[in-house]
Image (spheres, rainbow, N blue to C red):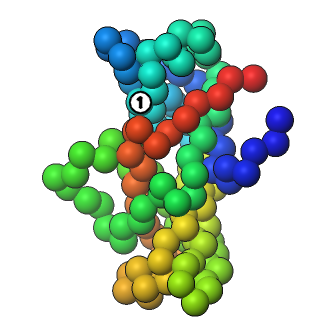
Amino acid sequence: MSLSIRNQLPGTVTAVMPGEAMATVRVRLAGGQDLTAAITREAAEDLGLTPGTVVRALVKSTEVALATAPVEGLSIRNRLPGTITGITAGDAMASVRITVEGGELTAAITKDAADDLRLSPGTPVVALIKSTEVSLAVA
């Protein structure tokens, strides 16, 4: 199946913490970083997620925020350091490609934000992704 979601990071489930309605799933990405996905408990069960399950973490580019320095005091669980490899900017929006350990991410942010942060190829950034915005797929 082909998807329009650009951000598809391979990884392996390391832990599943089921709650009453939701579950948090910890995934070790191919680059060694940990990513947390908050999905429904039913989805975790339907996918048969257990430690060792090979998955793809899916994130829409509109759900990736960028910071130019480490951020403290923030509830966003997923913070992936990387380096900008390219920017395509229009009148209103910019598409920013970021290389992270083991893969690549794309962030769709406003052109004003890209300008304010002075983003350019080679700029180190931290990609911020809320755990509720991470979907998981199994093969």
Image quadrant assignment for residue 26: top left
Query: Image height check: is 30 above or below 91?
Result: above
Residue 121 in sight from this viewpoint: no
Residue depicted at 52% across the width and 60% down the height: 62
Residue 73 in sight from this viewpoint: yes
Q: Position of residue 51 (x, y in %)?
A: 52, 12
Residue depicted at 40% across the width and 39% down the height: 131
Q: Quick check: 103 left or right of 125?
A: right
Image quadrant assignment for residue 61: bottom right
Query: Image height check: is 68 above or below 21?
Result: below
Q: Position of residue 43 (x, y in %)?
A: 54, 18
Q: Quick check: 131 left or right of 104?
A: left
Q: Element type at marker 1? A: strand
Q: Position of residue 25 (x, y in %)?
A: 44, 24
The residue under label 1 is: 38
Residue depicted at 63% across the width and 55% down the height: 104
Residue furthest left in the image: 73
Query: Image height check: is 136 above or below 64?
Result: above
Circle 1 packing at 10 Å, graded few (<14), some (14-19), many (20+), is many
